Each structure stands twice: as C-alpha cells, then as structure tokens.
Amino acid sequence: MITPETAYIACRFFLDIAALYLWGSSAYLWLLVPASLSGNIWARQYWLQALALGSIVAATIVALPFRSAILSEDWAQAFDFSAMLDVLSDTAIGTAWIWQAAGTAALLLAYIAAPMRLRAATMTVAAGFLLAGLAASGHAAMNTGWLRALHRGNDIVHVLAGGAWFGALIPVAYILPLLSDRQAGRDAATALVRFSTAGHVAVGAVLISGVANMFLIIGSFPLDWSVTYQLLLSLKILLVLSMIGLAILHRYMLVPKLSWSRGAVTALRIGTVVEIVLALAVVGLVAWFGMLEPVAM
C-alpha cells in the first residue's frame, strides 16, 4: 500500500515541476524573447500550460489531506475534516498550505482573466509568488530569528533562479527549430543568445544559494552517505553540475556556430532535451529528500 509520505512526495514533485515551468517559461517569454516571437511560442504551449495549471490545482487540493495523514500516520485522517482543520489552523504546515492555495488562485486568475498581452507578465508574478511560498516552508523552519529569515530568503533565491533556468528550457526547445526559418530565424537567434546570457546569472545564483543552503542545513558538505538525505543531496549536486557542464558547452561551443552549422543546431536540440530530463530528476530528488532528516538522529 502506498504510504502518505510517498503520495505526498509525488504530489510535491508534480507541483514543483509545474510551478517551476510556469515561472521560468513565462519570465523568459515576457522579458527576453522578442515580442514578434513570444506570442507564437506562448500559444504553442497552450496544452502544456493547461496541464501544468491542472497539476498545481490538483496537488494543492490533495496536499492538505496528505499532510494530515502523515502527521497522524493514518490514511483515515486524510478524509477527516476536523483533522485537516487542526493542521490548517495550528501548524506551520497549514500556514504554508494557505500560501500555496493563494498562489494557485493567483495563477488561475492570471491565466483566465489577464489580457493576452499581459498574460506572461501576470503569470510570472503569480508563479513567483507560489514558488516563494513553497521555498519558505522548507527546512528553514528549523532555524529561529534572523537565521530563519536569512535561510528562507536564500531558499527563495535558489528556487527562483533554478526555475528561471529550468522553466525557460521548455520554450527554448520550441524556439530551436525556428532557427532555420527565413522569417523567424533572426528573432529565434536573438532569444537564444539572451537565454544564454541570462543563464550566467541564473546558474551563478543557483550555485551560490545552493552552497549556502547546504551549510545552513547540515553545516558541511554532504559526505555522510549513511544518511539518506545527504546521499540524495550529493546525487542532486552531481546532476546540477552535469547541467552546468551542458550549459557551458551550449553557450561557448554550440551557440557561436548556430549561424552556419546545422549540426550545431541538432546538437543544441539534443542537449536541451537532456538538460530538461536532468532537471526533472533534480526536482524529483528534492521532493524526496525534502521530507527527510538532514543529519543522523
């Protein structure tokens, strides 16, 4: 039988993936992609955006019952309204869920009600708000006072920077085939160069905030692999470093060749897909070890 913890990890995975995608892709299309191309790429992601929104809504609805079942170690409590109300009103988990629900509502409102010309901007703000709430409810709660505020701020920077990187990879995958298009090719090349340039900032922020987070949580490098949290964190670091290696290869080996090498375009498309797969694995690991104790008890 699936345990409440396993169900909640799956819930976190789909929620995080969807929120990171909507944040990063919306911000990229709003700020970095030429307007003549942005609307086209936005429209082509319609069903993917709808799926992401549906995942966020579903994950938000089931998150509170799952947490109630985890706290009581009994699936029956997932369907006990009074138990869920206790979690909602008396715990930090409940406060985090309220923020999550508010972020989800803001996303839906932005997607449904915002004018099309403002939709990318409003979705960026709403998804950023949702991610900030998710980040602030993690291991930072183990600290107190100014250290808790510092830890939460660092977590928010980490997740927003990672989302800007990962989420933008999806529209990049849509843009790459347009490089050979006579009309859209120039705008596509501009969008890719801007992504590569902004990626320096995102990757730098991911690395700095990630190292800070590691020391804030476990106080050292994750070398005690007898602790599952540290083993999974080490795997995450390895995957992130692999993504960075690919990003460097793309920026300095492939992007300069795009104007004259068809092979560079093909290699960049394959590398982008590999980066997306690696990012999915990273989010899966975070959803898993975020439920674990970081050090041996």
Image (cartoon, rainbow, N blue to C red):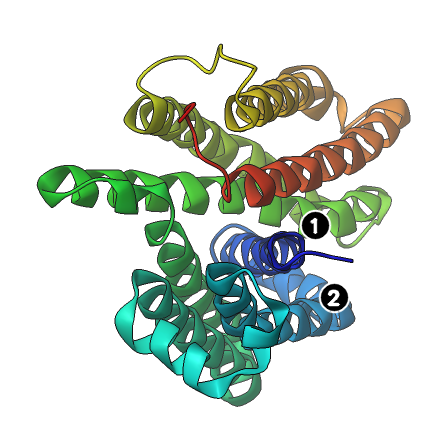
Q: Are marks 2 and 1 in contact (CB under 8 Å)?
A: yes
Which residue is pictured at 49% across the width and 72% down the height?
64
98 on left or right of 253: left
Task: Count how many numbered circles sit on residues in the image.
Answer: 2
Q: Quadrant of residue 82?
A: bottom left
Checking the image for residue 33, the label placed there is none
Dot 2, how many residues are within 10 Å of its Cα: few (below 14), some (14-19), or many (20+)?
some
Residue 244 in percent (x, y) is at 59, 22
Residue type for callout 1 = Ile
Which residue lies at the image location 36% right of the left edge and 69% below the top edge?
94
The quarter of the picture where the N terminus appears is bottom right
Give the label on residue 170, or none: 1
Mark 1, secondary structure of its residue: helix
User: Residue at 69% of width from left, 42% of height from top?
Assistant: 280
Which percent across, then down, holds residue 286?
Answer: 55, 39
Q: Is residue 101 left or right of residue 171?
A: left
Disc 2 residue type (three-letter):
Leu
Q: Which mark is residue 48?
A: 2
